[in-house]
Amino acid sequence: MISSCQQQQHRRLAAFVDDKEWLALHGSRNAGDLQSDYKYQDLLHRLRISAYLHYREHDVLWGVSAAVLHHIPLFGVPNDHPISVINPTSNSRSPEITRTKRAVDGVDTCCQGELALTTPVRTSLELTRQLGQQAGFAAQEWVLRRSLLGPTDPPWLKHGYPEVFVEQSRNRVDSEFRPVIERLTVGRATARRMADCIDARSESIAESYCSFNLHALGISGLDQQVKIYDHAGLIARVDFIDHVTNTIIEVDGIEKYVKVGREQMSKQTYQHNRLLALGYTVIRFRFSELLHLHAFATKLFAQAPQLRRRWESPR
């Protein structure tokens, strides 16, 4: 038993011995179940970062590691990704941790317990440097949304977004993102362009990836989270819509985050047919189709050539 083990390095595990929920979880699930349980795997990732024993003085968690502790959703990052820290005087690398010699302004750091890490806004901006623009864009939209709505979406949101929400979103970008952008040492121009485009109405990482692709193709001004009605009432709240060409874009989230099954498929088909009857062009993207801009553009313009004509015509 760990509780009777005399090895000093195992004492930090003792808390789990008396955690009834933790013991019940492992007693009721096999290794395969736990491996495919994304919430459990995310928890292990956070525990690995927070329980690391060899942090140095002035270490600050940043990038992926800070995002994990802030619960910023990421895609394609393995749980054994090396812990990322910056330190004003030290460079080092091991399979467990990558330490980069770099300073960060104190106003852009915060604490979780005894750990120092970059703030959610700074973390989302730094993810562009570590994971690329699409991942950084999605992180920034998530941080903006949480800044406006709190840690979880409020119940009133099911009735739709208030008219002032977009204005509030832009004001929050100006007050919380732009000052941090100006303190970046690299990537300020890219960060400024992305700040012009992020929208707190993106409700998932998939919608953020789609929005990023649309902006990369020069397609802007699409409305988000719009309710569509017919004679029978509400059909759906669609992800993106271009009111000029009557084009609707819907995206499927990462499978682990969305409902799947025959009932859900039947509901989507019913909604799809009602939208077609109203004269809309409806394009649905799987998450995998959002990952590569060329594949996204090929499908988008094949099914909605009116979008290409609209944005290629003189404005």
Image (tube, rainbow, N blue to C red):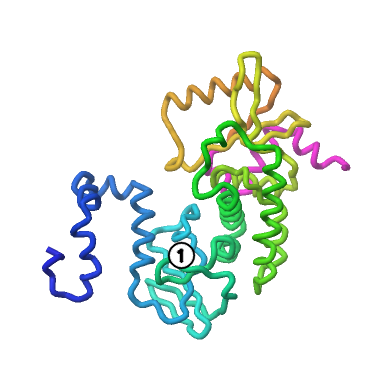
Q: Where is residue 163 in the image (x, y as percent from the top left)?
A: 70, 37
User: What residue sits 11% from the left and 68% below the top?
Assistant: 4
Whether residue 19 is visible here, answered yes or no, is yes
Amino acid type at circle 1 is Ser
Q: Please indicate whether residue 8 sits to the left or right of residue 82 in the image.
A: left
Q: Which residue lies furthest to the bottom in this view?
A: 89
User: What residue sits 87% from the left and 42% below the top?
Assistant: 315
100 over 236 or under it: above or below? below
30 over 272 or under it: above or below? below
90 over 140 or under it: above or below? below
The image quadrant of residue 241 is top right
The image quadrant of residue 43 is bottom left
Q: Please indicate whether residue 206 sits to the left or right of residue 245 in the image.
A: left
Does the segment drawn in magenta span residue 15? no
User: What residue sits 38% from the left and 54% below the top?
Assistant: 42
Q: Position of residue 41 (x, y in %)?
A: 35, 53
Total numbered labels placed on residues in the image = 1
Q: Position of residue 27 (x, y in %)?
A: 18, 48
Q: Please indicate whether residue 129 sits to the left or right of residue 72 in the image.
A: right
Magenta-drawn stretch, dominant element (helix, strand or loop): helix
286 over 231 or under it: above or below? below
Query: How many other residues sit within 10 Å of disc 1, few (<14), some (14-19) or many (≥20)?
Result: many
Q: Where is residue 133 in the image (x, y as percent from the top left)?
A: 62, 58
Does the segment drawn in magenta span residue 303? yes
Q: In which quarter of the image is the N terminus?
A: bottom left
Under circle 1, the secondary element is helix
The residue at which mark 1 appears reads as 65
Residues in magenta? Answer: 286-315
